[in-house]
Amino acid sequence: MNTNVGAKKTELTELPRIGDRISFIYFEHAKINRQDSAITFTDSQGTIKVPAAMISVLMLGPGTDITHRAMELIGDTGTGVVWVGEHGVRQYANGRALSHSSRYLERQAKLVSNNRTRLAVSRKMYQMRFDNEDVSHLTMEQLRGREGSRVRQIYRHQSQKYGVKWTGRTYDHENFDSGNIINKALSAAHTALYGLVYSVISGLGLSPGLGFVHTGHDLSLVYDIADLYKAELTIPIAFEVAANASEEDDIGRVTRLKVRDSFVNGKVIKQIVSDIQYLLDLSENDTLNAEVISLWDDKKKLVKHGVLYTYNG
């Protein structure tokens, strides 16, 4: 039995307001770890503890060594992390997207902010799951119903194929071990898929929170995109694991390894990128690496930056 469960994850309602946080803390030549809900900093002079939820940005200078558990807490509390040069003079790395262009993000925001275009993208997402049917005339309510029937049929088919008893999708976010083998395998498989989708979305410079079908959650777009691949990828893997596993097995680990193996050839990542480009009506030729910065103008739309403008009105 694993007794090292760590501290309870901080609830969103417990996080201090951004305006009440310390602006930033800089450390160098220190070992950074976690103790309960605090980040510990250890150097030659000793150890100090700082509540992670009170920090806006953590600046890590040369000689810093940070643990996985510390990064887990920092992520949970929404604290920014920036790796910088000595005394914070130069910024070397942070969580910046791989893309240097905001083109994808601007396109995403434009499409999701208009009911007509949002519905069009949502229909495209559903159409990708119904190859031989035209769903362009269906309402969102009708599309949800059709999708529900499709997924139930997939579960029944996989249950029969692998001889795994299926009584429905039931799981507790707060208690993974409370589920049966197949539900634990499904949860682990889907979580691994969400992680991959999140990395692609972030790498393209998109907002994970601006979804088209899903809404109101900071991972809405992640759920939108991941749903495109569950039927062919994670659901079959989960049923295969359940068919060959016992209650004594570490279902989460076994499932994650099999999902990882399915990702290793890189085809899934390429498919995700291609599908996102299709959904947002962006071609492969749309550059994401150009270092182009413009100034917005209410009449001319875009004007050059780096220019000292004068107004003679």
Image (spheres, rainbow, N blue to C red):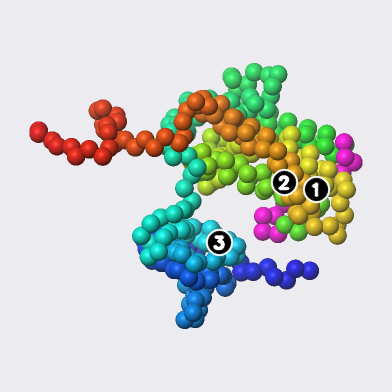
Q: Residues within 10 Å of mark 3 (few under 14, many from 20)?
A: some
The residue depicted at 48 percent of the width and 39 percent of the height is 99
Above or below: residue 137 compared with residue 219: above
Task: Give the quadrant of residue 25.
Answer: bottom left
Residue furthest out toward the left: 312
Residue 27 in the magenta stretch? The answer is no
Q: Nearer the viewer, residue 15 or 85?
A: 85
* Numbered label attached to residue 260: 2
The residue depicted at 52 percent of the width and 43 percent of the height is 202
Marks 2 and 1 in Cβ contact (< 8 Å): no
Task: Choose the circle earlier in sequence order: 3 or 1.
Answer: 3
Q: Residues within 10 Å of mark 2 (few under 14, many from 20)?
A: some
Q: Give the residue at mark 3.
A: 71
Q: Magenta part mainly helix, strand or loop?
A: loop
Return the x and y of residue 7 as percentages of the image width and height.
61, 69
Q: Give the residue at mark 1.
A: 182
The residue depicted at 40 percent of the width and 64 percent of the height is 86
Which span is picked out in magenta? Answer: 161-175
Q: Name the amino acid, label 2.
A: Arg
Q: Name the amino acid, label 1.
A: Ile
Above or below: residue 168 compared with residue 127: below
Question: In this rendering, would 128 be left or right of 280?
Answer: right
In which quadrant of the rendered image does the N terminus lie? bottom right
